[in-house]
Amino acid sequence: MNWLLGRLIKPLETIGSSFSPTVYGHHTEYKRYYDKSLPLARKLIEPLKQAHRADFEHLLYRLSAN
């Protein structure tokens, strides 16, 4: 979703949309939280990945299922 927000900023600015600042704000705020939380998420996930490979694969499948 953040990728999409980032891609929408320039087109919205080009057409003079009033949504451009809001989209920019959401994009930068989401990126900031993502960058801050990613190391912790990786630290928490790694033991699960190592100890229970099958459970981890099932979790990945469930998270990516539409």
Image: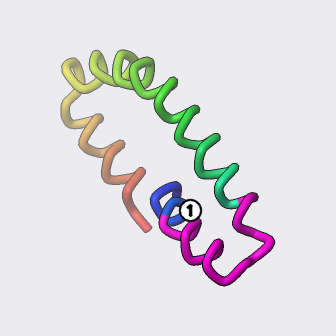
**In the image, what residue occupies the spot 32% across and 46% down?**
60
In which quadrant of the rendered image does the C terminus lie? bottom left
**In the image, what residue occupies the spot 65% across and 55% down?**
24
- The number of discs equals 1
Residue that sits furthest to the bottom in the current view: 15
Vertical arrangement, residue 58 with respect to residue 22, above or below: above
Q: Please tell me whether the stretch drawn in magenta is mainly helix, strand or loop.
A: helix
Q: Secondary structure at mark 1?
A: helix
**In the image, what residue occupies the spot 28% across and 20% down?**
46
At label 1, which amino acid type do we have? Answer: Leu
Q: Quadrant of residue 47?
A: top left
| Rendering coords of residue 32 (x, y %) | 56, 34
- Stretch of the chain drawn in magenta: 7-22
Q: Is residue 14 magenta?
A: yes
Q: Quadrant of residue 10?
A: bottom right
Residue that sits furthest to the right in the current view: 18
Q: Which residue is mark 1?
A: 5
| Rendering coords of residue 14 (x, y %) | 61, 78
> In this orientation, which residue lies closer to the viewer: 35 or 61?
35
Q: Is residue 58 magenta?
A: no
